[in-house]
Image (tube, rainbow, N blue to C red):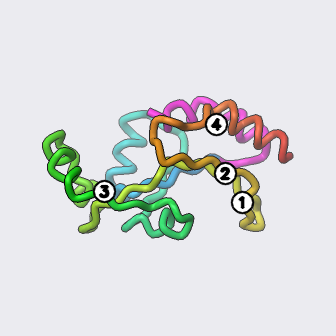
Amino acid sequence: MELEALAKVTGEIEAAGATLVAIAPQSAALNAEIKKDKKLGIEILSDPGNEVADKFGIRHTLPDYLTPLYTQFGINLPEFNGDDSWTLPMPARYIIDQGGNVCYARVNADYTQRPEPDETVAALKELK
């Protein structure tokens, strides 16, 4: 799980003067459960309806033909996310400064293509 990999570099992120925060569309209760089950020491904020993802331009709606496939595998997005949509955010990683400026962004529509946590740490140190 990507959150677990990122959680392993939390110390380096904090040493660089930053805070790691995850944002996920699941309900706050489900995010809290994930945090507890995975023993993550990071905050996981809830993004109901993928509204934050939409503002970043990374929310996408699953095509209708995928809904039965997801359901078959026990993935009921409306239930997990607490709304009626079948939307997901594209995996993304941002470094945002205290003024709200995006200083680093990595987004890929292919969920299997994610930057390594070390790449994010290196970018953070470079910005410092």
Mark 4 or mark 2: which comes first in sequence?
Answer: 4
Residue 98 position (above or below residue 8) = below
Secondary structure at badge 1 equals strand
- Nearest to the observer: residue 53 or residue 5: 53
Q: Of tags 3 and 4, which is closer to the observer? A: 3
Looking at the image, tell me whether mark 2 or mark 3 is earlier in sequence order: 3
Q: Which residue is mark 3?
A: 62
Quadrant the N terminus occupies? top left
Q: Which residue is mark 4?
A: 10
The first of marks 4 and 1 along the sequence is: 4
Q: Amino acid at mark 2?
A: Ala
Tell which of 88 and 44 is nearer to you: 88
Does the residue at mark 3 contact the one at mark 4 (Cβ under 8 Å)?
Answer: no
Few, some or many C-alpha atoms within 10 Å of disc 1 (few <14, some 14-19, many ≥20)? few
Q: Please tell me which residue is depicted at 54% across the width and 70% down the height of the picture.
A: 55
Q: Which residues are magenta?
A: 1-19
For disc 1, the marked residue is 102
Q: Earlier in the sequence, mark 3 or mark 4?
A: 4
Mark 4 surroundings within 10 Å by alpha-carbon count, few (fewer than 14), some (14 through 19), many (20 or more): many
Q: Are marks 1 and 2 in contact (CB under 8 Å)?
A: yes
User: Of marks 1 and 3, which one's residue comes earlier in the chain?
Assistant: 3
* Cα distance in 3D space between marks 1 and 2: 7 Å
Residue at 31% x, 59% y is 81
| Residue under numbered circle 2 | 105
From the viewer's perspective, is the residue at label 1 or at label 3 nearer? 3
